[in-house]
Amino acid sequence: MSKIDARRGWILEQLKDKGSIQVGEVVKQFSVSEATVRRDLEVLENEKKCIRTLGGAVLEIMKMETPFFKKLEINAEEKKQVAEKALGLIRDHDIIGLTGGTTNYFIAKRLDQFEGLTIVTNAINIAYELIGKPGLRLIVTGGTINTQSYELSGPLADGTLNRLSIQKTFVGVDGISLSRGITTFNEMEAETNRVMMQKSLQNYIVADHTKFNNSSLFVINDFGSVNGMITDDGVSPEIVRRYREAGISFI
C-alpha cells in the first residue's frame, strides 16, 4: 500500500469513527502539508466518500437518510436475527419502549407471542403493525412526523414520554462509534429517543453489524445509559473486543 493510500484510508477510518475530520489532524498525524490533505479530501469527495467543509470534511452518509421502506430491503436477514435476540429479553407483562427503525419494526411483528405487554412507541408504522393485536396495550406519542423514518418527535413526543416509566427500551440507530456514541440523522428524533432512554430502566441498542464504526450527524446518547448491544453474527471479533474493552456489553 502506498503512503497516499494509507493516508486516505486513515482519513476514512477517522470519518467513520467520528463523523468528521479537520485538516490539521491529518497534517499532525502524517507530517504533510495542508495542500496535500486538501487534495486527499478532494479525491475522496469525488469518490462520494466525504463532503468537504471549510476546515476539513464530514462523512458523506452523515447527511443522507434512506426512506424506511428502502431500509427494509437492506440487511433484512441480519435485522431479523437482531430482532430474534431482542425478543429473548422480553417477558410477559413487560412495559416495552420501541423507537423507530427497521429492526424495531421486525421486533414489533413478533410481539403477539407475549401476553399483557404495554408498548410505548414514537413510530407510526410500528403502531400500525401493533394495532388490533390481542393482549397488547399500545401507547403512541404525539409529535411531528419525519416522513422518511415515520418517527414522531419534538416537544409533544417528549412531553408524553416524560409522563411514563418504561422497563426496557430498544433503540434503533443509524450509527455507532466509540468516540461519539449512538447517532441518528434527525435532530429532533435524537432528542426524543434520548428522552425515551431516560425514562427507561434498561436500554438496548438494536443494530446490524454495518452500523458499527459509522457516525450520523446527531448524537442520541453516549454508552453510559446503554445496558447492552444487540447485533447480528456479522459483527467482527475485533469490533466486539474494542467495545467490550470500553465497558460495553453485547447480548
Image (cartoon, rainbow, N blue to C red):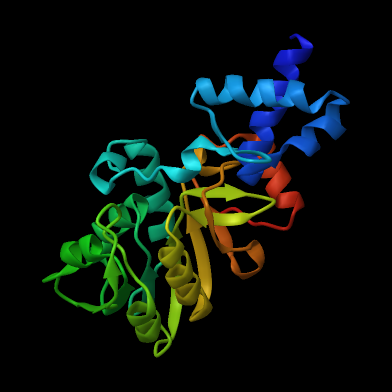
Q: Quadrant for residue 223, please give it.
A: bottom right
Instruction: Please state the horizontal and vertical placement of residue 95, each as a whole percent of the image.
Output: 37, 79
Q: Residue at 28% across / 45% down in the picture?
A: 67
Instruction: Please state the horizontal and vertical placement of residue 153, each as a whole percent of the image.
Output: 35, 70
Q: Nearer the viewer, residue 85 or 142?
A: 142
Q: Is residue 80 above or below residue 181?
A: above
Q: Residue at 85% across / 26% down in the picture?
A: 30
Let me know if residue 89 appears in the view. no
Q: Residue furthest left?
A: 132
Q: Is residue 227 above or below residue 15?
A: below
Q: Nearer the viewer, residue 33 or 1?
A: 33
Q: How many marks?
A: 0
Q: Is residue 134 above or below residue 80?
A: below
Instruction: Please state the horizontal and vertical placement of residue 189, each as a whole percent of the image.
Output: 41, 64
Instruction: Please state the horizontal and vertical placement of residue 116, each as a whole percent of the image.
Output: 26, 79
Q: Is residue 218 left or right of residue 113?
A: right
Q: Residue furthest top?
A: 2
Question: Which part of the image, by quadrant, shows the C terminus?
Answer: bottom right
Let me know if residue 3 appears in the view. yes
Q: Is residue 161 left or right of residue 175?
A: left
Q: Residue at 67% across / 57% down in the picture?
A: 248
Question: Which part of the image, by quadrant, shows the N terminus?
Answer: top right
Q: Residue at 50% across / 71% down in the picture?
A: 194
Q: Is residue 241 left or right of residue 129?
A: right
Q: Residue furthest bottom?
A: 163
